Every structure is written in C-alpha cells, then in structure tokens.
Amino acid sequence: MSLSILDYGAGNLKSIINVLEYLNYKYKIITSTSEINNSKILLLPGVGHFGQLMNHFSASNLIEPLKDYIQSDKPFLGICLGMQILFESSEEAPGEKGLCIFPGKVVKFTKGKVPQIGWNRISITPGNKILTEDYFYFVNSYCVKTDNKEIIAATTDYYDTFVSAVEKKNLLAMQFHPEKSGKAGLKVIKRWLEHVN
C-alpha cells in the first residue's frame, strides 16, 4: 500500500524519502485536499513554524480535510511539528489555533540550551508495541503539554519531563525525528508501517 507524504514546502522530505526507499516502501508526495481524501496512509513531516504551517493549511483549505482524515482513524504519522499541530495552541504562535485533535498546548523550553539539539532517550508507556526505549534525534525549542494520559506514548527528560510521542489507534506522532535517528528510528517507522498494513 502506498504512503502519502503531505508536502507543505518546509518539511524535511529527503530524509523521509530515503528511509522509505531503504524499506522498499512506495510513496507519493501530495499537496491537495483531494489527495488527502484519497490517502490510505498519511505522513506529515515537521520542520518549520507552528503559525506559518497553520496559515498555509488555512490558505490552502487543508485544515478540515486533514482533521477529517485524522479523526477517521486512518493511519497517520506525524513528526516534530507534525505532532505539535495536533494540539490546541502553541506559544510559538499565540492566538493561532492548532488542529485541536487532542487537548493540550505546545510550550517553550524554559531551562537548558534552547533549542534542544541532539540525541535523547525516550521512556515508553506500558503496552506500547511500536516505540523502543532508545536514543532518538531531537531538534526542538517547544514541547507538548497535555493532561490526556491515554494518548501519551513516550516521555523524555530535558531539564523537565515532556511528552515526546502520542498515539491513538492508527495515529502515531513523535517530537523526535525517526528519519534522522539511525537504526532506532528505522525500526520505529518499519514497525508502524507493519502495524497499519
């Protein structure tokens, strides 16, 4: 089954494409409402600014199709900013709404070097079959805060504990970059693809 990668002009497509080609997995790059509606598996890479991304989605009339797709429980993989926009708001763009799929907000780190750049370990929640307790590559100044413990798949410590992955049914979203995380990241993407197929 082919995977659709939603291209909004700022995502790190090359690294994702390299992983999919290594796994011999078919993919297509999409940009439109009709392509979202017709997708069987959707991946949203994340590099950029929360407000700029939501403004792009709004101008392109992609917000409702994207929300409808995610809420239909079709397979969805979100990476970095692709995880953050699933929540209600972000301190990076005050007044700008996220997709509001989950309750919670995105807040800026207040301790340590910002952004966090480099390898950090994730701690997974009980019963998680996709993620592994390993080191993954992070590049983030902001992190998710949510009281909905049912969706938390992993947490990470960076002077404080923050949510580094969420999941619900066929949805998995990560603050870290699995496509830049070597063997550990490759394993996560492979497991997720096998899980949703």
Image: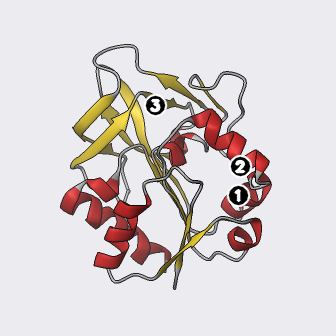
Amino acid at the residue labelled 2: Phe
Judge from the rendering whether residue 44 lies leftward or rightward of residue 140; answer left or right: right
Dots 2 and 1: beta carbons under 8 Å? yes
Q: Position of residue 90 (x, y in %)?
A: 60, 28
Residue visible at 66% across and 21% down? Answer: 94
Q: Is residue 152 visible?
A: yes
Mark 2 surroundings within 10 Å by alpha-carbon count, few (fewer than 14), some (14 through 19), many (20 or more): some
The numbered mark, 3 or 2, whose residue comes first in the sequence reads 2
Judge from the rendering whether residue 34 lies leftward or rightward of residue 130; answer left or right: right
Mark 1 surroundings within 10 Å by alpha-carbon count, few (fewer than 14), some (14 through 19), many (20 or more): some
Q: Where is residue 132 in the image (x, y as percent from the top left)?
A: 27, 55
**Closer to the camera in the image, 74 or 82:** 82
Q: Which corner quadrant of the image does residue 29 belong to? A: bottom right
**Which residue bears the numbered disc 3?**
143
**Which residue bears the numbered disc 2?**
57
Q: Is residue 100 visible?
A: no
Instruction: Quote the CA–CA distance across marks 3 and 2.
Output: 21 Å
**Which residue bears the numbered disc 1?**
66
The numbered mark, 2 or 1, whose residue comes first in the sequence reads 2
Q: Is mark 1 on a helix, strand or loop?
A: helix
Amino acid at the residue labelled 3: Cys
Q: Where is residue 173 in the image (x, y as percent from the top left)?
A: 48, 52
